[in-house]
Amino acid sequence: MLSGVIIKPLKKFADERGFLTEIYRKDWKDLFGDDEIVQANLSITYPGVIRAWHRHKRGQIDYFLVIEGILKICAYDEETRKLDEIISTGENLQLVRIPGHYWHGIKAIGWRPAYLIYFVNKLYDYSDPDEERRPWNDQTIIPKIINGRKDDPRCGKPWDWNYPPHK
């Protein structure tokens, strides 16, 4: 993983009524360190929709939790040209930490909308947003390492969010 990208599996406590999952605890220092969560958001993304690329230059960190559907979450380090691709689902609950200085984005994969709750450590400033954007299909995002591998067939090519999973 890129430095600072962390995946924390979440536990489901099930009984005959359903289940409960803790999605935030301030004592999860392995994930949050000294970060303080100050805002939570809900995003619903329809199947096949790509929301990319953007980054935060003023220290924002995003914590993603897919609660329904499936998301492909990508983080890209422009300096090292390393890319992390994470598949996160509502069936296998996990919190994914993305330091904002990486270019990052999501794609809803599968046949149903993806429901994403995300937490941030900086309040959104409506008058001066901490967001820098580039197109989802930016041809200059060319990873040389994907998920720690140099032999991935997608390495050395512009990132293709729609690359078939069976190749």
Image (cartoon, helix red, strand yellow):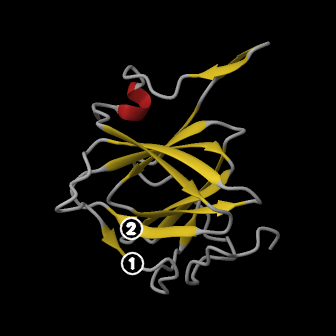
Residue in view at x 58 percent, y 84 percent: 157
Q: Residue at x 32, y 60 (%)?
A: 101
Q: Secondary structure at mark 2?
A: strand
Callout 1: 10 Å neighbours few (<14), some, many (20+)? few
**Above or below: residue 42 compared with residue 130:** above
Q: Nearer the viewer, residue 129 or 31?
A: 129
Image position of 9 with respect to 86: above or below: above
Q: x, y (%) of residue 35?
A: 29, 35
Q: Nearer the viewer, residue 107 or 76?
A: 107
**Looking at the image, which residue is at 55% across and 83% down?**
158
Nearer-N-terminus badge (1/2): 2
Q: Splitting the image into 4 quarters, where does residue 7 fall?
A: top right
Residue at mark 1:
134
Q: Which residue is mark 2?
A: 54
Q: x, y (%) of residue 65?
A: 54, 42
Q: Are marks 1 and 2 in contact (CB under 8 Å)?
A: yes
When asked about the image quadrant of residue 93, the answer is top right
Total labels: the figure holds 2
